[in-house]
């Protein structure tokens, strides 16, 4: 397993560098941010001073070399917008996104497993049709619309939940519900399909013929084999959330990395953008490794062989 | 063949996620990682929701709306303040001022005032502030916004007397200085300060970055103690969410609401001094022909736009500044909507050899103000009906600025740029110098005669100044026609019934908490 991990880390390093270089170069191709940070009637002298003060008058390769030198010293530069340390801003925002993404995905997986298994027990039965309808709807509803409607119904009309913010348990409900619906809808369909297939396998008939109860057949025999595809898709969906749930973070005032990245792009706040992308990329690589390990634990066929008899 | 990897017990398929979910929620304690948990503000706190988090509270950046709305006259104060209703300059940290020569102004400063760090306010601090903001290499936003390249000579004559000398006569120097928030001499001169110290009624208690700023009443304030002990600022990008926070009782005051935000009777209209206009590039065909620029003015149905898009809350504009700004010309009438006349003018220009089929880029900034997209589509349609070839370009701020400010984008033909101009200073010079001088930062073109008129108005004072600027707006409409004025906007401020406050034209830039009181 250690060898496997080492290989994955080494193979991940190159894409990581490509991502950083790409973001660095593309961000600077969008133009000089001076116009955004200076008054509209700023003189050319003021623009030149700003550009020189922030090192933007240097050739791109020199700027890039400076940046990589800084990364090696764990110095990611300062925000043009706030003057704060860029890494501190990214590190402050990332846990909030991680919390939201992790809680959402765990709940989505649990709910999808339950509903997907229930639907698969009797294909084309009432439960299957209801779950198909619900999951299709869930996967199709735009999160922006859902968030606004959620606020209108549960915060304004019923007064049960806060409109936005992060104070108290109630503040989690609408953001998670908004984020959860799509992964839930997608996963229900994956689990349902895998379970229908698994439940028709000979070993399930064998288990039933041996007198195993239906719950045990589903959870101990079929689900174990059906879980792997769901895990793969759940991993992809989690990566999407870790990248930043921009719409939800924006509407609900959630202080996460997605909104930070969008704001940094719009404000041409290069240092913060680069720090946020690097942090997110590292997290996604780590997450992918964890998903691979989870996949290996579920399915012996893809488990790395570390010892042979 | 065996494997050394341990196989998960089968029941773990469901157990692990369940345990993880429980652990996550327990560990997080239902609080977000970088948030300060705690009860919502109540009692002596005023809860304000803004459109965005201030990037900084640095005093010399307080002309930025998102910074000034928190810091100005709450944390820091200027020497002089402009009354947003009357337009008059009123004493604050300076008690009186007068011109002592053509280029020098002398200010008498208030005694007995202290900064929140206990140091005394005096002429030395005032001189330090001006030098730091205007004469340094700090790159303060207020420097370019108010003073341009002009360095000032500042002298602390004694503890309560300050002289300020400008390189050329400047009759509105006191007005310009009203944009400078005074900071103590202990403030860094080499770096901007995110959390300034001032002389205002509130001091910064805590800034939970990304979440909330809390100001608390300062006991050492020289003036009247404000009614609210604390002011808490949060921010939400979506105006509908800000409105919802008012209706649900989560906030007391919300800024930047739109006509569609369903705020009901909790929304208070106020003139925000913002004017919307199309700026026409008269250097490229077909807009280089005055008949085409006149046709643009005739083709826009201003009344229809104001009535249908903005529910009648805005006012049709005849010039770039609203009433109340020195130099506003009350006699000017907006161009009437006359599509036939617009078509005739375009036809006339075409017959005279103007390439009226050349493309005009209608440049609009995304989300600049409520319903800007709909307005852009209406404008495109109405100009097309007049026979012009208009291509709509909806751009993000950074891209749009390459069309709005010099040096302009050069890669295409004529541009009609939708501008939203706010004159919060109350003097037309802050509009005209930027938008109408042929070298103005946001002016597409001008004429030598027009430049001479503007220079003369800039150096005039009193009634002469007012008349000069009135003539300038008239001349722009009849002889230059760089602008097709559309509307003077009306701001909407959300206010809970528990707060007494009447917003004014500067509320969007300078929200004075000390002017608010709890409703009895």
Image (tube, coloured by chain):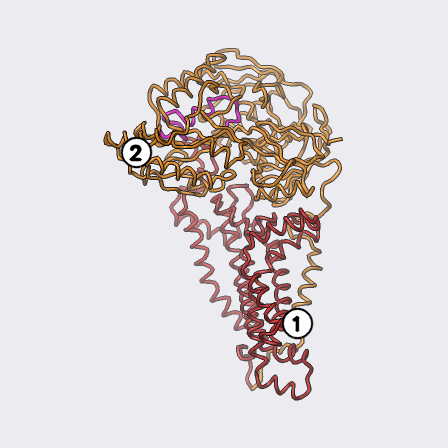
Chain colours: A red, B orange
Give the quadrant of the C terminus of chain A.
bottom right
Looking at the rendered structure, the secondary structure element under dot 1 is helix
Q: Residue sitting at 33 percent across and 37 percent down?
A: B388
Horizontal and vertical percent position of residue A26? 41, 51
Task: Kindly indicate the quadrant of the structure image that contains residue B504.
Answer: top right
Task: Kindly indicate the quadrant of the structure image that contains residue A15.
Answer: bottom left
Q: Which residues are magenta?
A: B422-444
Eyeballing the image, is B414 above or below A89? above
Return the chain for callout 1: B
In the image, is B387 to the left or to the right of B517? left
Residue receiving disc 2: B286
Residue B495 numbered tag: none
Looking at the rendered structure, the secondary structure element under dot 2 is loop
Task: Kindly indicate the quadrant of the structure image that contains residue A279.
Answer: bottom right
Horizontal and vertical percent position of residue A126? 62, 71
Dot placed on the residue nearer the N-terminal end, 2 or 1:
1
Mark yes or no: residue B301 visible: yes
Residue receiving disc 1: B14
How many callouts does the rendering have?
A: 2
Marks 2 and 1 in Cβ contact (< 8 Å): no
**In terms of depth relative to the viewer, which is nearer, B268 or B144?**
B268
């Amino acid at each position: 397993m250690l060898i496997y991990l080492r290989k994955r880390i080494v193979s991940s390093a190159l894409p990581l560098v490509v991502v950083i270089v790409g973001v660095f170069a593309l961000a600077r191709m969008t133009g000089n941010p001076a116009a955004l940070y200076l008054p509209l009637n700023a003189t050319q002298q003021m623009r030149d001073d700003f550009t020189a003060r922030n090192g933007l008058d240097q050739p791109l390769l020199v700027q890039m070399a400076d940046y990589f030198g800084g990364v090696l010293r764990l110095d990611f530069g300062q925000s043009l917008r706030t003057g704060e340390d860029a890494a501190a801003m990214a590190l402050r925002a990332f846990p909030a996104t991680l919390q939201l993404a992790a809680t959402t995905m765990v709940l989505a997986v649990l709910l999808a497993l339950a509903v997907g298994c229930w639907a698969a027990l009797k294909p084309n039965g009432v439960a299957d049709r209801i779950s198909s309808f619900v999951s299709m709807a869930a996967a199709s509803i735009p999160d922006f619309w859902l968030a606004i409607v959620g606020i209108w119904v549960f915060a304004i009309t019923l007064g049960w939940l806060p409109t936005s913010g992060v104070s108290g348990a109630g503040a989690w409900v609408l953001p998670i519900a908004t984020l959860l619906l799509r992964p839930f809808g997608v996963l229900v369909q994956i689990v349902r399909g895998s379970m229908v297939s698994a439940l028709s396998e000979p070993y399930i008939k064998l288990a039933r013929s041996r007198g195993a109860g239906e719950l045990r057949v589903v959870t101990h025999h079929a689900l174990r084999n059906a879980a792997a595809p769901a895990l793969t898709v759940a991993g992809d969906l989690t990566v999407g959330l870790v990248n930043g749930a921009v719409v939800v973070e924006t509407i609900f005032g959630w202080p996460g990395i997605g909104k930070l990245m969008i704001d940094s792009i719009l404000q041409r706040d290069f240092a913060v953008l680069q720090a946020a992308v690097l942090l997110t990329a590292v997290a996604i690589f780590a997450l992918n490794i964890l998903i691979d390990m989870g996949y290996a634990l579920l399915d012996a066929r893809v488990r790395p062989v570390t010892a042979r008899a | 063949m065996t494997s050394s990897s341990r196989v998960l017990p089968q029941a773990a398929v469901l157990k692990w996620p369940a345990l993880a979910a429980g652990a996550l929620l327990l560990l997080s304690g239902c609080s977000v990682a970088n948030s300060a948990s705690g009860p919502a503000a109540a009692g002596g706190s005023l809860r304000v929701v803004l459109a965005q988090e201030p990037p900084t509270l640095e005093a010399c950046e307080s002309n930025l709306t998102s910074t000034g709305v928190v810091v100005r006259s709450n944390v820091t104060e200027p020497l002089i303040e402009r009354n947003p209703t009357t337009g008059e300059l009123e004493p604050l940290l300076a008690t009186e001022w007068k011109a002592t020569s053509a280029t020098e102004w002398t200010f008498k400063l208030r005694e007995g005032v202290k900064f929140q760090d206990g140091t005394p306010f005096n002429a030395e601090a005032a001189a330090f502030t001006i030098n730091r903001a205007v004469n340094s290499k700090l790159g303060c936003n207020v420097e370019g916004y108010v003073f341009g390249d002009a360095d000032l000579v500042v002298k602390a004559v004694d503890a309560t007397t300050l002289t300020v000398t400008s390189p050329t006569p400047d009759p509105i120097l006191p007005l310009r200085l009203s944009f400078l928030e005074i900071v103590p001499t202990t403030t860094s001169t080499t770096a901007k300060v995110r959390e300034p110290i001032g002389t205002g009624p509130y001091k910064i208690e805590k800034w939970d970055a990304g979440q909330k700023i809390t100001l608390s009443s300062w006991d050492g304030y020289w003036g009247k103690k404000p009614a609210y002990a604390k002011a808490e600022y949060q921010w939400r990008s979506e105006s509908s969410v800000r409105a919802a926070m008012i209706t649900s009782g989560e906030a007391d005051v919300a800024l930047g609401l739109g006509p569609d935000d369903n705020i009901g009777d909790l929304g208070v209209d106020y003139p925000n001094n913002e004017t919307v206009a199309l700026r026409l590039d008269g250097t490229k065909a077909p807009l280089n022909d005055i008949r085409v620029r006149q046709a643009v003015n005739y083709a826009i149905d201003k009344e229809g736009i104001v009535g249908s898009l903005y529910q009648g809350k805005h006012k049709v504009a005849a010039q770039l500044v609203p009433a109340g700004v020195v130099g506003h010309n009350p006699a000017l009438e907006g161009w009437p909507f006359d599509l036939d006349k617009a078509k005739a003018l375009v036809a006339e220009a075409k017959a005279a050899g103007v390439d009226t089929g050349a493309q005009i880029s209608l440049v609009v900034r995304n989300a600049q103000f409520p319903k800007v997209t709909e307005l852009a589509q209406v404008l495109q349609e109405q100009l097309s009906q007049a026979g012009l070839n208009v291509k709509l370009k909806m751009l993000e701020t950074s891209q749009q600025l390459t069309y709005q400010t010099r040096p302009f984008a050069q890669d295409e033909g004529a541009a009609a740029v939708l501008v939203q101009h706010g004159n919060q200073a109350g003097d037309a010079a802050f509009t005209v110098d930027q938008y109408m001088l042929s070298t103005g930062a946001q002016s597409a073109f001008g004429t030598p005669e027009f430049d001479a008129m503007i220079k003369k108005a800039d150096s005039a004072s009193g009634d002469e100044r007012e008349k000069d600027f009135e003539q300038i707006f008239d001349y722009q409409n009849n002889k230059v026609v760089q602008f097709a004025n559309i509307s003077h906007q009306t701001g909407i401020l959300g206010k809970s019934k528990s707060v007494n406050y009447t917003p004014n034209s500067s509320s969007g830039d300078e929200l004075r908490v000390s002017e608010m009181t709890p409703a009895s």
